[in-house]
Amino acid sequence: MKIIFDNEEWNVEDSSKNIVELAKEHEIYIPAPCYYKKIENGCCNCCLILVDGTMARACSTLPADGMNITFNTSDLLAKRERNLTCYALGIPTELETGHAHDHAHHDHDHDHDSCGDDCSCGDNGCGDDCSCGGNCGCGSH
């Protein structure tokens, strides 16, 4: 079977290995602390990838023939970094599949620099792509 990983074609012989394992074989490290610690797959959301344009967890995604995986983008890197920080601090995260909450009901005007979250929604005026998921622990959600 063949998959595409960041525009590179990979031959996959063992379809029982998840994307974290396959990337490791190609000398690409995908952060996945919950997976490496043998905790529930997907609990930390630090291994986010896009599979055919849809957000997924690399630790719980098995390859399929023709699958197109995107790993190396600035947006995904920022989300993985934020989730890794949250994981280290014990703050739960969610898999982001688009807008995690309704912007019409997301009304806050504080600076997320104080809580360490990257929020680009609501009264911050930065656009529609909300990346905070309402899980920053700042108490404004």
Image (spheres, rainbow, N blue to C red):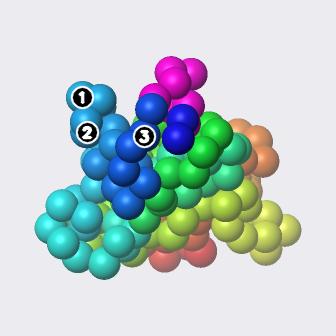
Q: Secondary structure at mark 1?
A: loop
Question: Callout 1, which amino acid?
Answer: Glu
Q: Position of residue 10 (x, y in %)?
A: 46, 29
For discs 3 and 2, the disc positioned in front in the rendered view: 3
- The region drawn magenta spans 3-10
Q: Position of residue 12 (x, y in %)?
A: 42, 40
Q: Mark 3 highlights which residue?
A: 12
Q: Mark 2 highlights which residue?
A: 24
Q: Is residue 5 above or below residue 48?
A: above
Instruction: Tell me how far mark 1 sits from mark 2, CA to CA.
Output: 5 Å
Question: Callout 2, which amino acid?
Answer: Lys
Q: Visible in this render: residue 73?
A: no
- Residue shown at the point (43%, 64%) measured from the top left: 60
Q: Is residue 138 left or right of residue 41?
A: right
Q: Secondary structure at mark 3?
A: loop
Q: Is residue 21 above or below residue 33?
A: above
* Rendering quarter of residue 98: bottom right
- Labelled pair 1, 2 in contact (Cβ < 8 Å): yes
- Residue shown at the point (25%, 39%) measured from the top left: 24
Q: Mark 1 highlights which residue?
A: 27
Q: Residues within 10 Å of mark 2 (few under 14, many from 20)?
A: few
- Residue shown at the point (24%, 29%) measured from the top left: 27
14 and 139: which one is in front? 14
